[in-house]
């Protein structure tokens, strides 16, 4: 039963195999990529440790267990939707590719970073499935520290490359969460 909690994280990892590979990418930043890797590791390890501590043969899940799994799966699905919408322009790195263009269709019509929103949903849901506020607070803290920095660096690179086209896109979309941020 407790293994169900890992479903969102497994879907997140499996989605990496479905994405198209960047073409002719010129990487612009490595520090934010390393920061994301560290944050994702912590956001996986902290809830995992709490889940392992909860495991007993008579494990009876808290209602947040199922709510968390559901939110995590929705987050993983939303990330896949973002990956498919961007196609080969979706990358783990901050970089500019050959024939790069601003994509403002699908979920990118309203949100500039729907893949990150999907990641937030995945790992928030995973933490919530533990019914531990330490896991939830830890994952939210790690996410917002790493991804706020990442979005700032990424958008700076896109403004330098696309100029006013990207600035106009920024003006008409939300960064991460509609009507909030």
Image (spheres, grey):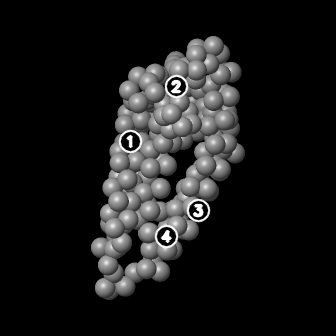
- Is 115 displayed left or right of 74 in the figure? right
Do the numbered discs 2 and 3 sit on residues whose CB atoms are within 8 Å? Answer: no
| Residue 107 in view (yes/no) | yes
Do the numbered discs 2 and 4 sit on residues whose CB atoms are within 8 Å? Answer: no
* Residue bearing the label numbered 4: 132
Identify the disc placed on residue 173. 2
Q: Quadrant of residue 160?
A: top right
Q: Can you give x and y, in whole percent of width and height, for residue 66 in the image?
A: 32, 63
| Tag 4 secondary structure | loop
Identify the disc placed on residue 138. 3
**Mark-to-mark CA distance, 3 and 1:** 22 Å
Q: Nearer the viewer, mark 4 or mark 1?
A: 4
Q: Can you give x and y, in whole percent of width and height, for residue 110 in the image?
A: 46, 27
User: Which quadrant: the N terminus?
Assistant: bottom left
Name the residue rendered at 48%, 42% in the picture. 117
| Tag 3 secondary structure | helix
- Is 122 displayed left or right of 170 in the figure? left
| Total numbered badges shown on the rendered structure | 4
């Amino acid at each position: 039963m407790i293994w169900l909690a890992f479903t969102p994280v497994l879907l997140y990892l499996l989605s990496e195999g479905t994405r198209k590979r960047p073409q002719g990418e010129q990487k612009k930043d490595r520090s934010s990529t390393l920061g994301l890797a560290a944050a994702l590791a912590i956001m996986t390890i902290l809830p995992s440790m709490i889940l392992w501590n909860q495991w007993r043969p008579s494990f009876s899940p808290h209602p947040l267990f199922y709510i968390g799994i559901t939110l995590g799966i929705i987050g993983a699905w939303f990330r896949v939707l973002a990956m498919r919408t961007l196609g080969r322009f979706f990358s783990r790195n901050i970089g500019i590719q050959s024939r790069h263009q601003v994509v403002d269709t699908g979920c990118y019509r309203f949100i500039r970073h729907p893949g990150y929103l999907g990641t937030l949903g995945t790992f928030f849901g995973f933490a919530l499935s533990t019914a531990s506020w330490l896991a939830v607070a830890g994952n939210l803290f790690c996410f917002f520290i790493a991804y706020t920095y990442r979005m700032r660096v990424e958008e700076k690179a896109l403004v330098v490359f696309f100029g006013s086209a990207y600035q106009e896109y920024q003006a008409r979309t939300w960064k991460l969460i509609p009507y909030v941020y």
